Image (cartoon, rainbow, N blue to C red):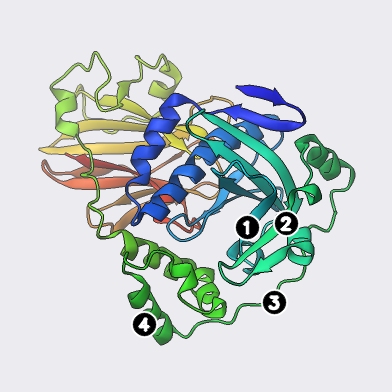
Amino acid sequence: MMLASDTQLELAIAPDILAQTWQQSQAYATPRSQWTAFLNQLCLDTLFPWLQAESLPQARLHRQAWELVNGTAIECDRQRFIFIPDKSADTRQITVPQEWIDLPDWAGDYYFAIHLDPDASTLRLWGYTTHAQLKTQGEYDDFDRTYSLAAPSLISDLAVLWVVRQLNPHEVTQAAIAPIPQVPAAQAENLLTRLASADIHQPRLELPFSLWGGLLSSGAWCDRLIRSRQQGTPAPTPLITQLSQWFQNAVEEIIEGWQTLDQRVMPELATSLRQASAEGDRPTQRRVKTLHFGQQPLLLILAITPVDEKISIQIQLRPEENTACLPPNLHLSLQTMNDDVIQSVQTGDRYNSIQLSPFKCRPGTGFKVKVGEQNLEQAEGWIEECFQC
């Protein structure tokens, strides 16, 4: 729900998002990163859908590294929008971590100053600015490696941004950025080992920025550092869907999020998914589950058929809206329980479905199905479903 507050955008945070986000944030390594993740996820789940609905329908998540840095980047029409959330009610200035300004692969075009009040369940976007303004007019603080720009230099009315993008689509929004030198592999390994400990509460301040920026500029090294810092946190036990139970139960109600196609009132999906087996009258069970990839609901559909003491399986992915298309560069991957890739398919432009080649499993065999974008910087950007035949 959108609320009016002068020219500033104010949105209500849904109660279920508050509870779910706080629970998810506990997987992060330190109290600082837990709080960072909590605020950023609240911001993403509340502001991002509004932006998609109102002005940026093609927007997608570009980057987040909440274990290490505050802020979230989304991308649309080759421009990046950086969310900088803060719980403080002090709106005298926007303060942006240096990574979002001085790393070429991280830098944005527009930066949104966002005040979050979880207690009041509100989000307020109180101003925005450009990379060029932050870089050339902002004050750099060497102590905490941030750029700050005073509130009078920010524009409070978000409508101005949409007008500028329409009337002046080639506006220069970024200042020049010095290249970040590459870190030699051997040195990077040593640095990753050193920074892995969760006892280091702010790893971003432990190294000279040239070294730190070199680590973060490599998606693989950044991802490894995040995982290594979180490995001391017990991972939740994955929910494993027992496919054999689908033959033993009529599934009159939703089980673990899976529904029959009839329950979803989607007969067109039942006919569009080819028979997993052509073996006479052997019963084929079809189930569908809604996955939330970014802000777009997707349907994961499985058809399973018993064949010669095995289970024949076919898997399809499509958007929930019949007329919608899947996001480009979206991967549907079949993997072992040890994350070895067995097969994978990828969308191009305007794909309305993708599916894996049919395969067979013996009873007791486990496998994973993952959905994600190959170029996502963080492993948690993938959606994972685990199964056992």
Residue type at mark 3 is: Ala
Residue type at mark 4 is: Asn
The local secondary structure at tag 4 comes to helix
| Picture residue at 37% right of the left edge, 45% below the top | 25
Q: Picture quarter containing residue 245?
A: top left
Q: Are marks 1 and 2 in contact (CB under 8 Å)?
A: yes
Q: Do the residues labelled 3 and 1 touch (CB within 8 Å)?
A: no
Please tell me which residue lies in front, 200 or 265: 200
Q: Is 309 placed above or below 186 here? A: above
Report the residue marked by disc 4.
190
Precedes in sequence: disc 3 or disc 4: 3
Q: Are marks 2 and 3 in contact (CB under 8 Å)?
A: no
Q: Which of marks 1 and 2 is in front?
A: 2
The local secondary structure at tag 3 comes to loop
Report the residue marked by disc 2.
149
Name the disc covering residue 96, or none. 1
> Horizontally, is 188 left or right of 40 in the view?
left
Q: Is 123 placed above or below 139 here? A: above
Precedes in sequence: disc 4 or disc 1: 1
Precedes in sequence: disc 1 or disc 2: 1
Precedes in sequence: disc 4 or disc 2: 2
Report the residue marked by disc 3.
178
Q: Gap in Å between the C-alphas at discs 1 and 2?
A: 9 Å
